[in-house]
Amino acid sequence: MAVLSSQTGPAFDVVSIKLNLARTRSSHETLPDGTFRMINGPLVSVIDYLESGLRLVADLLGLNPVFCRSSALGLSPNLKSQERVIAAVKAVGGVHYLNAPGGRRLYDPAHFTAEGLTLSFLAPYSGPYKCFLPALLTQPLPAILADIRASSRLEPPT
């Protein structure tokens, strides 16, 4: 039996999570296409699994992000770290790179500015859900979406 846990929350049995997701959401909400395939399907690669999970959550919350892997952009394999990020942003016509709260030490704001790009970071999450997986199983999806929108703030690099 696989168990997921974190330092801030209880342990969750993966099988129970799958069953609860099916029961909780199928009784009053339509699950996005591919939900059960994503949950029960074979793990082809970790990257495919993570992307499928992101797509599933986006679908559950009614979000429509555009996903693009940097490996599909034809970037030079010699580009690493912030140089690869800058090249990826430019390859899709972007002018702003938004990173998760961590990683501030990985990027030089002046270098992004010199390349004509804006660099920002999400503010650390401080909402009521310490772990989103149980919230996705037990809370109304509109409440989760409202919390994400209310708590998502951009911070400049420091």
Image (tube, rainbow, N blue to C red):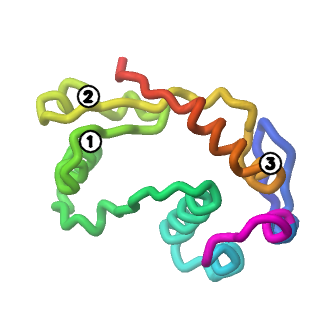
Tell me how far mark 1 sits from mark 3, CA to CA: 37 Å
Q: Which mark is residue 108?
A: 2
> Which residue lies at the image location 24% right of the left edge and 48% below the top edge?
89
Residue linked to disc 1: 82
Query: Does residue 97 appear in this view?
Result: yes
Amino acid bearing label 2:
Asp
Instruction: Indicate which disc, 2 or 1, sits on the residue closer to the N terminus.
Output: 1
Q: Residue at x 20, y 62 (%)?
A: 77
Residue occupied by mark 3: 139
Mark 2 closeness class: few <14, some 14–19, many ≥20 residues within 10 Å? few
Give the x, y percent position of residue 112. Answer: 20, 32
Dot 1 falls on a residue whose secondary structure is helix
- Can you give x and y, in whole percent of width and height, for residue 35 in the image? 66, 73
**What residue is rendered at 71% in x and 47% in y?**
132
| Amino acid residing under circle 1 | Gln
Seen as rendered, the residue at the extreme top is 158
Callout 3: SS: loop
